[in-house]
Amino acid sequence: DFDTKVTIMLEDGAVEEFTAGGCWAMCHIDAKKMPADTNDVQKYITDSRTKMTKKKGGGTNYKSDAEIADLVAAGTFIEYWQARLNPGQPATPLHGYVLKDRYEHPTPAISVNATEAGDNWVVEFSCPMAGGSGMKAFEAGKTYNFGVALHDQNTAGRYHLTSFQYTLTIDGGDGDLVANQ
């Protein structure tokens, strides 16, 4: 449906696997279109499962709804922002988080501005600094981990390019990217 999708995934140190491995923290052997795909399981993080194995993943060994709600309240999830792009059309924002699976906020709290520059896109994401339910709050001096994924040329599913993880700090610090308010 979209020529290109650009996604930013971020977290604030609450998800150990993301700190160590970036975007790959959400891709498990049992996820959709992966080698052990048997349950049509979407992206997830290990904190959402009661049992995990290297050869089978976490499958549908979900923690209870109350435990999942507690994890969301504690910020144990990976937030994602996505710009869905088609030439000559405004960007379509998508916003959510990954925990038990991929959750999409019904109304995105982010905004996206995207312009075409020849064969390239320039994409700007904006979000509230205060965060909210299922969102990370941004604080000066705190370090955030982020990664970028690019689905290009109308690709879908697992057919995308991903970055290694980077760090972001606001108003100073030792991040790969230092942003100012």
Image (cartoon, rainbow, N blue to C red):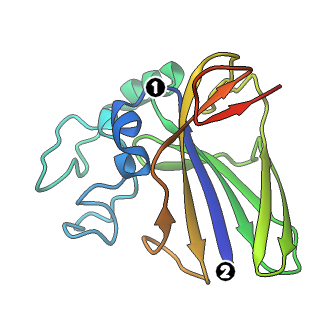
For label 1, the residue is: 13
Q: Is residue 133 visible?
A: no
Please provide percent x and percent y for residue 160: 49, 70
For label 2, the residue is: 1
Q: Depth-wise, is mark 2 or mark 1 nearer the camera?
A: 1
Is 47 placed above or below 110 here?
above
**Sequence-wise, which precedes: disc 2 or disc 1?**
2
Is 121 placed above or below 22 here?
below
Is 75 placed above or below 127 here?
above
Marking on residue 78: none
Q: Quadrant of residue 175?
A: top right
Q: Nearer the viewer, residue 112 or 144?
A: 144
Q: Secondary structure at mark 1?
A: loop
Left or right: where does residue 49 sit relative to residue 1?
left
Please provide percent x and percent y for residue 87: 82, 81
Q: Residue at x 39, y 42 (%)?
A: 100
Is 75 placed above or below 38 here?
above
Amino acid bearing label 2: Asp
